[in-house]
Image (cartoon, rainbow, N blue to C red):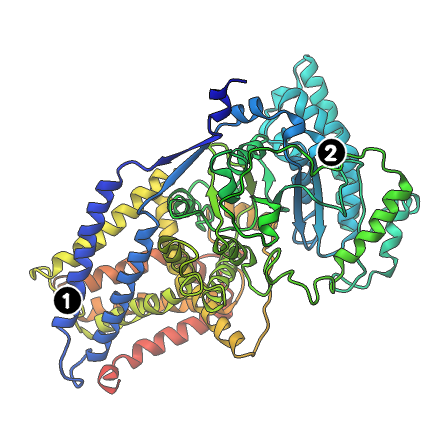
Amino acid sequence: MGKNEESHPLFETRRAKGIFIHRIFSFSMFLGILFIWVYRVSYMPRKSSEDGKWVWVGMFLCELWFGLYWLMRLSLRWNPVFRQPFSHTLSQRYDDDKLPGVDIFVCTADPKIEPPMMVINTVLSVMAYDYPTHKLSVYLSDDGGSDITFYALLEASNFAKHWLPFCKKFNVEPRSPAAYFKSISSTAYSDDSINSKELVIIKKLYEDMESRIENAGKSGEVPEEIRSKNKRFSQWDSFSSRRDHDAIIQVCLFIRVSSIISNGKIILNVDCDMYSNNAQSLKEALCFLIDEEKGHEIAFVQTPQGFENLTKNDIYGGALRVIYEWEFPGMDGFGGPMYIGSGCFHKRDTLCGRKFNDQESLKHWNGEDINNDQSITKTSLHLLEEKSKALLSCTYENNTLWGKEMGLLYGCAVEDVITGLAIQCRGWKSVYYNPKRKAFLGVSPTTLPEALVQHKRWSEGGFQILLSKYSAAWCAYGLISPGLQITYCFYNLWVLNCLPTLYYSIFPSLCLLKGISLFPQMSSPWFIPYAYVTLGENTQCLLEFLWSEGTIKGYWNDLRMWLYKRTSSYLFALIDTIFKSLGFSSLDFVISAKVAEENVSQRYKKEIMEFGNSSPMLTLLATLALFNLFCLVGALFKGGLGMLMVLPLQVLLSVVLVLINLPLYEGLFLRKDKGRFPTSVVFKSMAVALSACVLSNVNVFTII
């Protein structure tokens, strides 16, 4: 290999185009925001006895927050970068023996919510990476300690002996069996070629395995014939419950077993519902981690979470398109994206607490981390399993740095994000890699309650980070770049958006009902900044969404979820965080269901919003929707279409709120399926909304 080939980088970094134009536009938007602030201060009612005085003050505080939060959001678009790895250069430069060992951890917790068949499809997909087998180890961590999941893993280990050679022989994609069989057409089985014959055989093996595992899942027991022949199941004899059982560890295949279970220089962690969709993604991630010039600075490579079950218009905004296509590249431009859990490739030593040292480099990867001993006997394997049980005990990390300065940091709903921040505060950088063919595909929530609970967990965890000793706002000062500090704060402050959004959703509608003006008339020059900022912001957001392969209807759905998250998920996250900080409740981690019931699934495919329960978050959304409807109807009844000329912006805001809530009105009054709102929610929300409208006829604002 020549010197030029040896010095060629393993990846390139490109700056986003059109940044200068975007910055000019952003400057004009900021001027518009400044004029809005000036208008609020200049035209604020001077006497507290005047109608709307304190409502006006509240509007000013809301618009002040929206403007400042917009500035934080602007930082995410200030300097985005995009990465491109050169995996062919990696293959030319490093033969199999020089590649680092990789340990892959797949996590699951509950076989009812996370079915074993889904789990083993993820396991099989990462086992089939285009990577030297003796350098790859796969570990399944089951917090629930399910014998059904272990039985499924035993079945998968036998099937893998057929599946892995099949994948490599025909270079199939994706390498999750379920996803692969779903992706190929029925005609592929009818051909007389050798390929189709082998396809029929491997599919039959998979279906037989699937049938056995699902039967065990339905009965809740491992077949007695299997249990009696395999002594490994005796470890479940002392099993008490999911939360109370002895440590259980088993090695299913004599693949690489090194150190005490794991010592690969690279660690990949994957959620059990996020199967590998790209067999090359492991080598592509290595291009960043072991690049001779920049690799020594990089602690982890984060790939976006893709989802295979999204509807055309993404009814619940599960794709997070703008975050993954625009905002994470913006974080990368300031030193790297946050660690978001699944689909992240780590250097082991950085995850275990090592600080960055610019003098160190990664010019040589000689594979010395590998204990490639293929002559493990049953006796030595048994001793290894027994010795390793201590690592799984609940008390192993007591009086150690684990969970505090090493490994994942405990005590936060988003332990992944706070762990990544701690790594970056030790001087490391990270890389965001968004390949054309998604590295991983998973399952997005299929009901509104699931989506809201998920966002509650994320926003609550972010706020906990802000209040913790790892806070990006103050503790990270001087340890990471100012731009990265701001972007972390942007996400950590999600919950606080609930207050101004709720205010803007309630008081303009109330004032519309009473005929109190809160915005400038169309004939006033102060109307221009409101119109410009509103039009400019929504146009930019729409263009970003469309550029991210979304649809116009999908953008409308995303806007709806933006409102729902802020007025429910974020509000309850804020309340829970306050109560937990006062010691009234403990931290709970809620697992989202990964498989929907058949009727729910059919409604989801038709993009019919699913409600179905009477949770406080749904009750609040229904109440707000009815309140806005009653205020708009009442105002038009009192003032007619003339209200449109007198209070144009307030009418427009109320109309948008009503239109965006149409699915809620259908779920309250028109639908008959089980996905509608329960009757109890209908009555409660109507009673509260009507009471608020009636009380607004009293001179509430003067009383305030």
Residue type for callout 1? Val
Q: Are marks 1 and 2 in contact (CB under 8 Å)?
A: no
Residue position marked by numbered label 1 in the rendering: 38
Position of 401 with respect to 670 (left or right) is right
Q: Sequence order check: which comes first, mark 1 or mark 2?
A: 1
Viewer-nearest residue: 266 or 495: 266
Residue type for callout 2? Glu
Q: Residues within 10 Å of mark 1 (few under 14, many from 20)?
A: some
When asked about the image quadrant of residue 362, the answer is: top right
Residue position marked by numbered label 2 in the rendering: 207
Viewer-nearest residue: 524 or 171: 171
How far, Cα to Cα, is label 1 from label 2? 68 Å
Picture residue at 50% right of the left edge, 55% below the top:
426
Picture residue at 66% right of the left edge, 26% below the top:
96
Viewer-nearest residue: 308 or 691: 308
Picture residue at 32% right of the left edge, 52% below the top:
75
Q: Image quadrant for the N terminus? A: top right
Picture residue at 45% right of the left edge, 70% below the top:
574
The mark total stands at 2
The reply to whether residue 648 is in sight is no
Q: Is residue 285 above or below residue 54?
A: above
Position of 560 with respect to 351 (left or right) is left
SS class, disc 1: helix
Q: How crowded is mark 2: few (under 14 residues within 10 Å), some or many (20 or more)?
A: few
